[in-house]
Amino acid sequence: MIAETVCSAVSAAGLGIAAVTAYRRRFLAATRIAAYSLVPVALVMTGIVGWLADTAFSPTAWAGFGLLGCAWVLFATTRAVERRRGGTRKERRAAARAEAQDAVAPAASAPSLGPAARPAARPAARPEAKAKPRGEDDFSDIEAILKKHGI
């Protein structure tokens, strides 16, 4: 009962503000304010406000929300573990079987055309730079920048 009264008062105040805004010839803003102010009354008329009020003060409903949160945490945890391991158990088993098949009979799985048919190892994208020894060379790049700017 109180929630319906509050929602009606909020809607009436919003419509009053919309009327003042329309009087100032800001019709687009007034229309937007009127739309927002009609939402509380619409929620009361559909019964959502009553349902929310009953839910907010029900210990059973809060226990249900707690269980939903617990279920969500369990789902999220299993997804994280699954991603870390590299797929579902079924996918891992299929990959292990395929790996075992290739290891036991590689000639049976693909036609043998000799060493030229095997794909070559992928070359490195770029050679790795040698690590600089610690000591005086640590500030060489900073010195180069300072010299470049004449400092």
Image: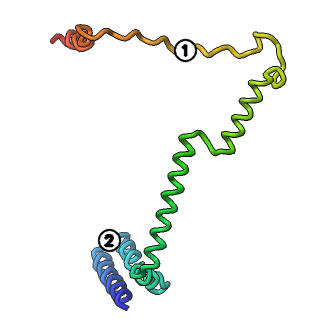
Question: In the rendering, which numbered label is found on residue 26?
Answer: 2
In this picture, residue 107 sits left or right of residue 41: right
Q: Which of 65 and 116 is in front in this view?
A: 65
Q: In 3D space, how far apart are the residues under numbered discs 1 and 2 (Cα atoms)?
A: 66 Å
- Foreground mark, 1 or 2, reads 1
Where 5 sits versus 88, above or below?
Answer: below
In this picture, residue 24 sits left or right of residue 72: left
Q: What residue type is labelled 2?
A: Arg
In this picture, residue 4 sits left or right of residue 97: left
Pinpoint residue 138: horizontal percent, then vertical percent.
Answer: 26, 12
Pinpoint residue 120: horizontal percent, then vertical percent.
Answer: 67, 14
Quarter of image, res 13: bottom left
Pinpoint residue 12: horizontal percent, then vertical percent.
Answer: 33, 85
Q: Nearer the viewer, residue 9 or 76?
A: 76
Residues packed near mark 2 inside 10 Å, few (<14), some (14 to 19) or many (20 plus): few
Question: In the rendering, which numbered label is found on residue 124?
Answer: 1
Provide the secondary structure element on which disc 2 rests.
loop
Where 66 sits versus 86, above or below?
Answer: below
Q: Which residue lies furthest to the left in this view?
A: 151
Provide the secondary structure element on which disc 1 rests.
loop
Name the residue rendered at 69%, 35% in the picture. Answer: 95
Which quadrant, please, contains the N terminus?
A: bottom left
Where 98 sits versus 83, above or below?
Answer: above
Q: Residue furthest bottom?
A: 1
Mark nearer the N terminus (1 vs 2): 2
